[in-house]
Amino acid sequence: MHHDDLPVGRVLPRRHALGLLGMVGAALAAGTGTATASAAPNVDCVATPEMVEGPYFVDEKLRRSDIRTDPATGKLSDGALVALNLRVLQIADGRCTPLPGATVDLWHCDAVGLYSDEADANTVGQKFLRGYQISDRGGQVRFTTILPGWYPGRTVHHHVKIRTTGTDGNAYEFTSQLYYPEQFKAAYLAKPPYAAHGTPDTTNAADQFYGTLGDQLLLNPRPHGRGHTADFTVALDLSDTKVGAPDGGHPGQPG
């Protein structure tokens, strides 16, 4: 599991403030990426940076909120419970508003660093820790999953892909990654079932992708019930037709 560092998309620079959505602007400026407020005028809304897809995306067409199980067997992935609440916003005409109807995929490795449905992991046909949701009228989706493990050469991360339609009427695809603070990672990776996999070899600071814009993609988990919960808002500039396209390519098709 060492090929996730192969670039597929582009890493975008931090975008200029475009106005509207107070809590979003405040949260992003603080580096939390979280937001809960509705639109309000004359406040920053910053486009979320794109990051590489990696080779482990599989379009399983598996619509579900709880992605922990392998649907063929019902086997539950072992690990610490986390609920991810994602909100998708669109930036247009100087406004930042909820984006309904977007396809939001989430995927990541299990507690010992394995991805499902991958030949090099001997998991072909399995679909654990993968799934998608459609954003509601508020642009929101919620996933129930486990905290990811680690594998050599990468810091702990989730992958997220959003597919919708751009302002030009063509398919628009955005891909990025979400990260955890070092102290939080160290605490849960030292416990079962993660501890059996040993000490991770890559920190956020040492990760070749986090080091560019990862601080803008950092989750802020908090205790909730038997596990944790984390919120993150993704703001998309749907007029940027190069987002999500490999060099010389075209954005992927919406789900």
Image (cartoon, helix red, strand yellow):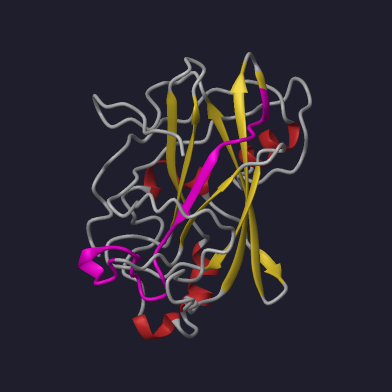
- Left or right: residue 137 versus residue 32 is right
- Left or right: residue 226 versus residue 130 is right
Quarter of the image holding residue 233?
Answer: top right
Residue 68 shown in magenta: no
User: Which x, y percent locates residue 144?
Assistant: 59, 63
Total marks placed: 0
Image quadrant where one finds the N terminus:
bottom left
- Left or right: residue 114 versus residue 221 is left
The range drawn in magenta is 96-124
Q: Which residue is drawn at 35% across and 51% down?
A: 57
Quarter of the image holding residue 95?
Answer: top right
User: In the displayed structure, would residue 54 be above or below residue 110?
Assistant: above
Q: Which residue is drawn at 51% across and 23% down?
A: 238
User: In the displayed structure, would residue 91 be above or below residue 244?
Assistant: above
Q: For this rendering, which residue is in front, 36 or 207?
A: 36
Residue 123 shown in magenta: yes
- Left or right: residue 35 versus residue 52 is right
User: Which x, y percent locates residue 58?
Assistant: 34, 52
User: Which x, y percent locates residue 209?
Assistant: 35, 47
Q: For this rendering, which residue is in front, 246 or 2?
A: 246
User: In the displayed structure, would residue 1 be above or below residue 176?
Assistant: below
Mostly what secondary structure, the magenta segment? loop
Q: For this rendering, which residue is in front, 198 or 234?
A: 234
Q: Which residue is drawn at 74% across and 37% down?
A: 23
Q: For this rendering, which residue is in front, 107 or 5?
A: 107
User: Which x, y percent locates residue 26?
Assistant: 70, 37
